Amino acid sequence: MDSVCENIEITHQKALINFMNWAKKNGAIFPDISFKIYGENERGVHSKSKIRKGSNVIKIPLKIIIHDGMGENTPIGFKLVKHNHGRINNFSIIMVVVFILTTIKHKNFFEPYYDILPRDISNFPIFWNNIEYEMLTGSHILYMIKKRQQSFLEDYQTIIKVCPEFKRWSIKEFLWARTIVGSRNFGININGVSRTAMVPLSDMLNHDPSPKVNWAFDNRDRFFKMKSNVSLKKNIAITDTYGNKCNSQYFLYYGFTQSQNYKNTISINLIHPNSDNKHYKDEIVPHVKGLLGKDIDKFLFNEIMVFLRISLSDDKMIKKYKYRSQYFYPLNNSHEITVLKAFNIYLNTLLSKYKFSYKKIKELLLTTSRLSKQWNALTLLKGEIEVIIFYKKLVEQSLNYITKKCDSFDKKYNSYFIKLRKLRNDCVD
């Protein structure tokens, strides 16, 4: 078994060396970088020497960049462009997919680049099996995965309806290419035209919320350039950013999660229960739906509180407070207590749906290989449950404040407690 693994690694290294020689031969410039293997299917770009701030770390010529315009010029791409392609999601990505699929099995100029693209992308959750999905029980990510799978399948079927010859590529091949392009592309401007592009070598930089480079396509010399935004010492990981996202998005689009991610969210979906005055409540705010993170100053948290104040109002209150703006602040002490307790019940309901408890997840993470499928699943769940815990603590501290059991609260809840302070000063039950 060890010899098999060694042979695979040797093959990968040969492909990488061949790719680097091809890139240099065709004008790519990257004198100060090296590659480091972290583990199976995991590698990174590092500084080979000191790099000054503002230096061109990587320069990739247009000649070796693949973009959607090239896909449009293929026979299949030309047909799809002429056809009403509004039903195809992310059409520019599909054009890159079409170009890759129509050229990858032939001796082609881009062959050295194709050879280093990962073939095993089973870390992406759209390729998981039902047993693996069981780990994610309770998370909204299961809905997101299903929706993405359905979207890809619909795109494949739409292409085949327009271009029956596209059947020569199986759904498996299409999903591979669609996932590769979706997770590695750059949005660049070439001669005033926005393009979706695959930029060899530049797409090998790993993600960091604080990236070491900025990038852009320079139309003056027709190079894609990655410039250092800080001075780098020797042997430092050179990173890009995939954007500030919650783990569900990193997981879905890139196949990884981050252990510390303050952008994590949970899915919220609230509607008024059936009652005699439901239609009056629906006229004010019929429902609340969205992704809730650990920032109470965002619109959604305040909208949840507005919704619950409306939903838990009796006939007398609904007649008195007819407009949404009248529910921006607590109505009175007893009513706000009811609102907070209802919110806590909802949070507990969300919590009860997870397969693992928060304590169990933390225990499992201690013995789970980092970046494995299980590690990513557990890290995703941990981040979501921490959002729930964040709001359960808010509820607890708020109830203590309203009932005057305790006046202290965490500063992160300050904007809500300003409203509670106003309630304490102004409201008489």
Image: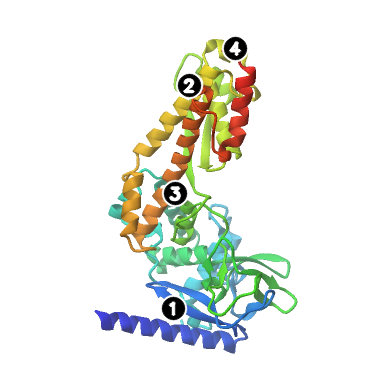
Residue 10 in view, yes or no? yes
Where is residue 30, by image quadrant?
Answer: bottom right
Q: Give the alpha-carbon distance from disc 3 to disc 4, as whole Å.
A: 41 Å
Q: Do the residues labelled 2 and 4 touch (CB within 8 Å)?
A: no
Q: Give the alpha-carbon distance from disc 2 to disc 4, as whole Å.
A: 19 Å
Q: What residue type is labelled 4?
A: Lys
Q: Judging from the image, what secondary structure is the residue with disc 3 in?
A: helix
For label 1, count other residues whose C-alpha is less than 10 Å away and answer few (under 14), some (14-19) or many (20+): few
Residue to which mark 4 is pinned: 319
Please provide percent x and percent y for residue 112. 49, 83
Q: Which amino acid does label 2 sit on?
A: Thr
Q: Residue at x 51, y 42 (%)?
A: 291
Left of 352 or right of it: where is 214? right
View extreme (right): residue: 220
Q: Judging from the image, what secondary structure is the residue with disc 2 in?
A: helix
Residue to which mark 2 is pinned: 338
Residue to which mark 3 is pinned: 383
* Numbered disc in front, either 2 or 4: 2
N-terminal-most mark, 1 or 4: 1
View extreme (left): residue: 1
Residue to which mark 1 is pinned: 105
Please provide percent x and percent y for residue 45. 52, 76
Q: Which of 383 and 204 is in front in this view?
A: 383
Numbered circle sitting on residue 137 = none
N-terminal-most mark, 2 or 4: 4
